[in-house]
Image: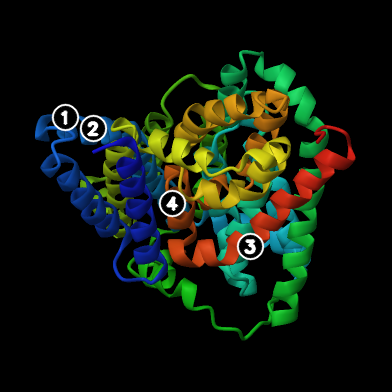
Amino acid sequence: MNETMLALLGFATIIMIIVLLLRNVTVPALAFIGVSTVSALILVLTGTFTVSEVGKFISKGVSGVHSTAALFIFSVLFFGIMTDAGMFDRIIDALMKKVGNNVVGVAFMTSIIAIIGHLDGGGASTFLITIPAMLPVYKKLKMRPTTLLLICVTSMGVMNLLPWGGPTMRAASVLEIEANVLWMKLLPMQAVGIVVALFTAFFWGFVEKKRGAGINSTLVIDDYDDLEESAATADIGELARPKLFAFNVLLTLVVIIALVFMPLPSYFIFMIGCVAALLVNYPGAKLQNKIIKSHAGPGLMMASTILAAGVFLGVLEESEIMNHMANALAAFIPQSMGHFLPLIIGVLSVPLTLLFCTDSYFYGLLPVLISIGNKFGVDPAHIAITMVVCRNCATFISPVVPATFLGIGLAGVEIKDHIKTCFLWIWGVSIVCLVAGLLLGVLTI
């Protein structure tokens, strides 16, 4: 197959997966595996790659996400233990006394926690810090978990521009400059983005309040059904450990601090946390077995989804199909529009984020666009800045970003509902940041 045909195969693969997910035809794991297998079969039957090569692609793809899958399993178990032990109930009661039925205050608090939590640049750790802490409050106030995720991903998207964040580092490496230098250029756009993220929290807090959310709300939220069922599998009264509250809070803080500062795999930190939490709160193999089984369902479902996404990423990335897709898209930019390349890529960044993983976006698409821009005298840094800022806004709604599945799994939200809720709003946020870049002189045409 030639490069054009490979690019078309890539687009068809991703579009099919997105359609299956949005139409709720099947669970994400089956969609990723089924469609990826068909694409892999086409690659083999056309003689593009051998079965052995495709096997290596899949192995590499799965190996790239297996740590995220392990992280999800043990993080779900850890926070499940903390919930069973009643730690979050005490914290929620304290928060509720502070904010009462102030739905807007809870939404704003969500944004602040996500912004602070994302200082380490890690999407998974931010989800793990923010969602388990805030979801019970949202449940009590009858606020939608999709709103929780929208506020989270908006705040995380603008904070992900930090120089130690993956996208900024990747773009800087392509430009062959220091990440700090690139960050200082885009800093005014990030400042505007943070203001927009806080506005997002206020706005959606008011939306939830207008719907009737609050301390005495009688709203029924369908999204919580599964969470309520899983919580019902354990007798909370029997499992509560009020006398161990101080220990559990301290252990949770140690785990979170270790996630941010310790040079250890995140999943290993949660493994150690689970060991300590089980041994102290629930001594005895029989009780420990009961606790682990009660949280097995959500852990298995999302771990299987993440591993299946690894198959998909392996087939498309390792075969360089995503690079061919990048070249094909770049070829469609008219010569007369060359001077407006930063604006074009800025406007299209959010839709493209649903198609390209981070590596293929910055290492595949960015160099191609820079070479095109050079023909028209476009500053390569301006192309990189628009790609970094506008793309980052949508990072955590993309089905090709493994951390997205961690977030929706923790919140108990389906990927289709997450994308439907966030897509247009996030796209608007990215365009606001783009316009801010023009007005503040960060970008020039």
Disc 1 marks which amino acid? Answer: Glu
Q: CA distance from mark 4 to mark 2?
A: 19 Å
Q: Amino acid at mark 2?
A: Phe
Which quadrant, please, contains the C terminus?
top right
Whichever of labels 4 and 2 marks the residue nearer the N terminus, that label is 2
Q: Is residue 329 left or right of residue 191?
A: left
Residue at the disc numbered 4: 399
Q: Residue at x 50, y 46 (%)?
A: 244
Q: Are marks 1 and 2 in contact (CB under 8 Å)?
A: yes
Residue annotated with mark 3:
424
Q: How is the image coloured?
A: rainbow
Q: Position of residue 399 (x, y in %)?
A: 43, 51
Q: Where is residue 296 drawn, in percent x and y?
A: 28, 55
Front label number (3 vs 1): 1
SS for tag 1?
Answer: helix
Which quadrant of the figure has residue 84?
A: bottom left
Q: CA distance from mark 3 to mark 1?
A: 39 Å
Q: Are marks 4 and 2 in contact (CB under 8 Å)?
A: no
Instruction: Give the CA distance from mark 1 to mark 2.
Output: 6 Å
Amino acid type shown at disc 3? Leu
Residue appearing at x 80%, y 34% in the figure: 443
Q: Is residue 318 above or below residue 7?
A: above
CA gap between label 3 and label 4 equals 16 Å
| Sequence-wise first label, 3 or 4 | 4
The residue that mark 1 highlights is: 53
| Kind of residue at badge 4 | Pro
